[in-house]
Amino acid sequence: MKAEFVNPFLVSILNVLRTMAKMEAKPGKPQLKKSDIANGDVTGLIGMAGEQAKGTLAITFTEPVILEITNRMLGEKLIAIDETVTDMVGEITNMVTGGAKKLLSEKGYRFDMAIPSVVAGKGHIIHHKSKAPIIYVPFGSDAGEFFIEICFEE
């Protein structure tokens, strides 16, 4: 998978968190993920399909990070992952994908987006629909770690 394809997702998550949650984050080194077990506690997963490529984006948050993001975005101090938090993960997934879709359209890619699904729980499984390699990018923030997985076939 080309960097020109991955970078719009990274730019988009940083933009969404900066503007919506006033949170700065820093991406780590992209790598191939070999497992389907999530590294966090709650994941938003969304499919995208177009003529040039199809696949899925997953955004996985550790509990401290998503609770802090939810607190900053809604002004509510939550203490556990609940329906409000899982709804927030779905919304963030949608916003990130929409931002990446816009950036990718500038490079000639056209996509239709599915409705995001959210899975929560320690050690949950992430099912990517594509058989392509999974590019995994860890992020650090003042609240802790979160992760993006990009799995697209061209």
Image (cartoon, helix red, strand yellow):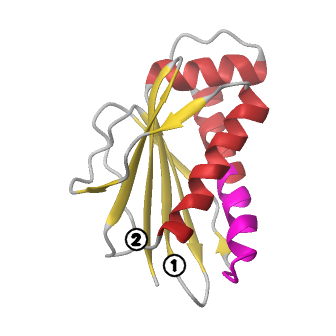
Determine the image quadrant of residue 28. Answer: top left
Above or below, 146 relative to 58? above
Q: Which residues are magenta?
A: 96-110
When asked about the image quadrant of residue 79, the answer is top right
**Type of secondary structure dominating the magenta stretch:** helix
Residue sitting at 49 percent across and 65 percent down? 56
Q: Which mark is residue 129?
A: 2
Query: Residue 147: percent from the left, percent from the top?
Result: 44, 41
Q: Amino acid at mark 1?
A: Lys
Calculate the distance from the C-alpha at mark 1 to the C-alpha at mark 2: 9 Å
Toward the bottom, the furthest residue is 51
**Disc 1 marks which residue?**
54
Closer-to-camera residue (22/41): 22
Q: Is residue 136 left or right of residue 114?
A: left
Going from N to C along the chain, the mark reached first, 1 or 2, is 1
Q: Is residue 122 left or right of residue 16?
A: left
- Figure check: 85 above or below 115: above
Q: Position of residue 143 (x, y in %)?
A: 52, 18
Q: Position of residue 43 (x, y in %)?
A: 47, 43
Across and down, in percent, residue 18 comes to 72, 33
Residues at circles 1 and 2 in contact by the CB criterion of under 8 Å: yes
Quick check: 137 above or below 23?
A: below
Q: In the picture shown, does residue 93 fall above or below 64?
A: below
Q: Quadrant of the N terminus?
A: bottom left
Q: Secondary structure at mark 1?
A: strand
Residue sitting at x 62%, y 45%: 13
- The residue carrying pointer 2 sits among few (fewer than 14), some (14 to 19) or many (20 or more) residues within 10 Å by Cα, namely some
Q: What's the residue type where badge 2 is placed?
A: Lys
Under circle 2, the secondary element is loop
Residues 84 and 138: in front is: 138
User: Residue at 38% of width from left, 74% of height from top?
Assistant: 130
In depth, the one of 145 and 66 nearer the eye is: 145
